[in-house]
Image: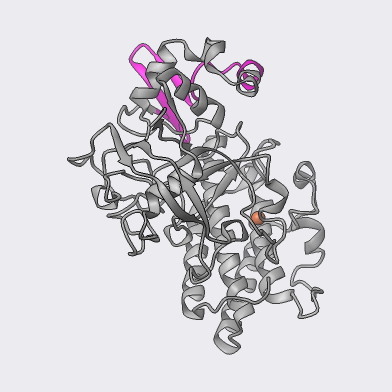
Amino acid sequence: MDRFPSLDPGRAREHLVAARARLDALTRDVGGAQLFGPKLDIVNPFLWELGHVAWFQERWCVRLRDDGTLGPSLLDGADALYDSSAVAHWTRWHLPLADLVRTRRYLAEVLGHVLDALDTRVEPRLVYFAELSAAHEDMHCEAFHYMRQTLGYPAPALDADAHRPTAGGEAGDAVFAGGEFTLGASPDSGFVHDNEKWAHPVRVAPFRMARLAVTNREFNRFVEAGGYAQRSLWSEAGWRWRTATGYEGPRYWRLTPDGWEQRRFDRWVPLIDDEPVAHVNWFEADAYCRFAGRRLPTEAEWEFAAQGSDKRRFPWGPAQADAQRANLEGAALAPVSAIAAGDTPEGVRQLMGNVWEWTASDFLAYPGFAPDPYEDYSQPWFGTRKVLRGGSFASPRRMLRATWRNFFTPDRGDVFAGFRTCAKGE
Ligand code: FE
């Protein structure tokens, strides 16, 4: 990184404080055996992940010296416990972790140091790392949220916005003329991750994109038609996943004499037809598309739809996300027809919020990519993951913008992800 962008220390402070409030809300009731949970490759022990959030913030904002070496940690031996690049996943259940009280104290002490530093010595470098650690904490907040779903823990106690279906949420496609636009973040975008850098010209052919995300009702047609058993609808890798796991429908669905139900955290509730299908992986989204005679959008098409030729920061314009414009930083899914104020000018709804949207695209570096100081954020994952866009109801809204790229392997169905489709051909 040649030089650190000039960022607002007041905003960085707000982001850190807000991220910590959400972290507390998502984890404060977790205790006892829940702090460890089962050994799965898609979750971390809660206790480990809490310590890791503190360690990350301390490493970049407090301990990092000008010469690249690290000063001491407030917690003895922290590097051997919480460094995600160095501590193998499967060992995290067997480490001599700090207990919950000490871990929470570590979190609070580190944050206190960083806030003091922001008040007393404002350097671009410190503000950049404060923003990085706020974004990191926000991403772990979302991870805590979907880990609670994965493990069947109770829903966290969060304030929920009531989102109701709204008029004008029409099915069908919006038409985009395509053309050249710039994909990625520009240097005046404020804090961005290395994988968004930098805006570069891309040509997009004309395309038609669904105004709404695929709903449970629509996806259920595929399930009830036996789509999970039809080899011809699946990619080779997708069929391997399907055969190995034996899934016959989306995870967390079950058929009862009263109809389909869905597990939400620790409870089974009737499946809501008008909500977006969620917890489907890329293979399932891809197979559905084949069934429906549709295709997934590329990430360039998604960003073209979200930014328009005027390079909006958000699908609706420049204004920061709030509850009227996007279902972000909430507690539950909304119907796909809700939240009309977040539409793009073409009427594409909920591009941001509600569910992350799988795209057809592999997660690859943009031209001229160079890793930022946290080198393991993007670089190790290029070429092995698919891009998701837009954020979910569980994503803190301060974290996102239209250029944000999320990335998971195509078998991951535990995250709050669904998809929308595009028409095949023009
Ligand atoms: Fe992390």
Which residue is at the far bottom?
120
Question: What range is drawn magenta here?
Answer: 241-268
Q: Position of residue 318 (x, y in %)?
A: 34, 64
What is the quadrant of the N terminus in the image?
bottom right
Q: Work out whether residue 282 or residue 256 is closer to the camera in this orientation and state it.
A: 282
Q: Residue 265 magenta-drawn? A: yes
Instruction: State the residue lying farthest toward the left.
Output: 167
Q: In this orientation, which residue lies closer to the viewer: 300 or 31?
A: 300
The residue drawn where x is 37% and y is 17% is 221
Q: Which residue does the image show at 49% across and 24% down from the upper left?
A: 250
Q: How is the image coloured?
A: one colour
Q: Is residue 307 visible?
A: yes
Quarter placement of the C terminus: top left
Tell me residue 164's x, y (percent): 23, 42
Q: Is residue 251 visible?
A: no
Measured as percent of width and height from the top left, residue 122 is found at 58, 86
- Seen in the picture, residue 228 relative to 134 is either above or below; the reply is above
- 207 relative to 28 in the view: left or right: left
- Residue 361 in which image quadrant: top right
Ligand 1 visible in quadrant: bottom right
Q: Position of residue 406 (x, y in %)?
A: 55, 48
Tell me where residue 293 sits by quadrant. top left
Query: Which residue corresponds to the image point at 33% horizontal and 64% vertical from the top-left?
Result: 319
> Magenta includes 257?
yes
Residue at left offset 55%, top offset 62%: 135
Q: Count the labels in the image.
A: 0
Q: Which residue is nearer to you in this view: 64 or 72? A: 64
